[in-house]
Image: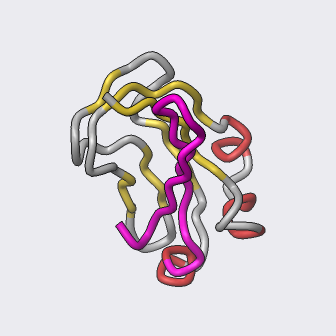
Amino acid sequence: MPDIWVREEGGGRYRVGITEELLESYKEFLYVEFLKKPGEEFGPGEPLVALESLKSVYELSLPFGGVVEEVNARVSEDPSILGEKPGEAWLVVVRKR
């Protein structure tokens, strides 16, 4: 899981984003698609977000299951936000099962 960061917020909630290392590998992301919407459950390893670059697609998943609580719609409207502060720009907030 070195390509993403996961920050515990308490109460079983986790905020998730990408690392600078992932951004360096893909250079920039042109499109962000949330594969799970708020309220939807997901299993371990199940893709939550698809990040599309010029050459390929990176699917973000977690090693645990849970439910999506929030998605960062600003990132799907303007994926360049991820390049500005990859260690801070978040994609989803989940609650672990």
Q: Residue at x 48, y 82 (%)?
A: 25
Q: Residue at x 77, y 68 (%)?
A: 84
Q: The N terminus appears in which quarter of the rendering?
A: bottom left
**Residue 52 magenta:** no
Horizontal side, residue 45 vs residue 87: left or right: left
Tell me where the magenta segment starts and ends, as one range.
Answer: 1-21
Q: The C terminus appears in which quarter of the rendering?
A: top left
Horizontal side, residue 28 vs residue 6: left or right: right
**Residue 11 magenta:** yes
Q: Residue at x 39, y 53 (%)?
A: 60
Horizontal side, residue 89 vs residue 19: left or right: right
Q: Is residue 63 above or below residue 34?
A: below
Q: Position of residue 62 (x, y in %)?
A: 33, 49
Q: Position of residue 95 (x, y in %)?
A: 44, 30
Q: Position of residue 23 (x, y in %)?
A: 56, 75
Horizontal side, residue 57 vs residue 65: left or right: right
